[in-house]
Image (cartoon, rainbow, N blue to C red):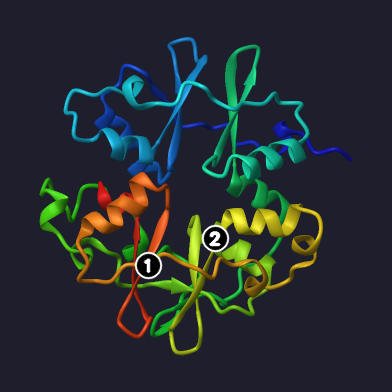
Amino acid sequence: MVVRARDVMTERVVTIWADAPLARAQERMAESRFSALPVVDRRFSLVGVISLVDVLRHRDDPHAVVGDAMTEQVVSVLPTTNVSIVAHRMRVYGELRLVPVVDKGILVGVITRSDLLRHRHSGGRLRRTARRIGGVVPVAPLPEAMAPRGAGRIGGRPTSSLRVADVMTDGGLVAIPPELALDETAEVLLSYRFTAVPVVDDRDHLLGIVSEADLMHGSLDGGRRLRARTVSEVMTRDVEVVHPADPLTDAEDLLSRRGFRVVPVVDDEDVLVGVLSRSDLL
């Protein structure tokens, strides 16, 4: 049976108006833990998409509204679109994590990479295979340290005055072993609503990082990736990292200008000691 966009899309969509203050978009992303929001007009017609990286790039303008920062040329699909086409577009457009579903010009849902992974791995049971540095991670609830902080630690201070250690997440770190099966890795990402998770050895040395995009390639592409079974076969090994004493501006360059979603923080022996995400820069 052909799976359509309407079969996997999320219908209860968090949206925002184009004339809303940019700070409101930031608040809604922090509240909902989404990294992008569809932008609609008063008739619920899709007019754009705003992402967390858009917010970061325009946050120095106190008068900016969503329409100033959003992307207007949006890749959208119909409810009847084959879901394999949606997956293909997400692979082709690497930064794309959200595809709006539009019917007669009206936004009726969205599809994220998480929706695609959830559909493929539905019915699975999350096992205790993710590890917290220093111990096993409980399946629930979400570790407090991994929740988005919004404007918490930066607190309006200029990033030029801060170090990575000032804002990184360093408690309750979640990591996975390289031999973990891809199905179980997908369950970890879905359960904790992560976009990526570090891969470490049994002494917490960073080996790589695996993302939703890596799992999509591993699950949906042809060739070798389709036959991949474990994290080590699909993870990114050549990982950009920062150190606790590095200027925060170094990490900001990776996250907001070069498009990284998560940057691992390691010590001088490449032991994972923290992570930085875009939400940490708000």
Q: Helix, strand or loop at disc 1?
A: loop
Q: Is residue 181 above or below residue 30?
A: below
Q: Residue 93, image x and y in percent? A: 59, 39
Q: Residue 237, image x and y in percent? A: 54, 70
Tell me the quadrant of the picture where the N terminus can be found: top right
Residue at x 64%, y 41% (from the top left corner): 92
Q: Residue 7, image x and y in percent? A: 73, 36
The residue beneath circle 1 is 241
Return the residue found at the far right: 1
Label 2 vs 1, first from the N-terminus: 2
Q: Amino acid at mark 2?
A: Leu
**Residue 149 seen in the current view:** no
Label 2 crowd (10 A; few <14 / some 14-19 / many >=20) = many
Q: Residue 100, image x and y in percent? A: 58, 29
**Residue 227 seen in the current view:** yes
Camera-nearest residue between 153 and 137: 153
Residue at x 44%, y 27% (from the top left corner): 15
Q: Which mark is residue 121?
A: none
Are dots 2 and 1 in contact, CB under 8 Å? no
The residue beneath circle 2 is 189
Q: Is residue 54 above or below residue 231?
A: above
Q: Amino acid at mark 1?
A: Val
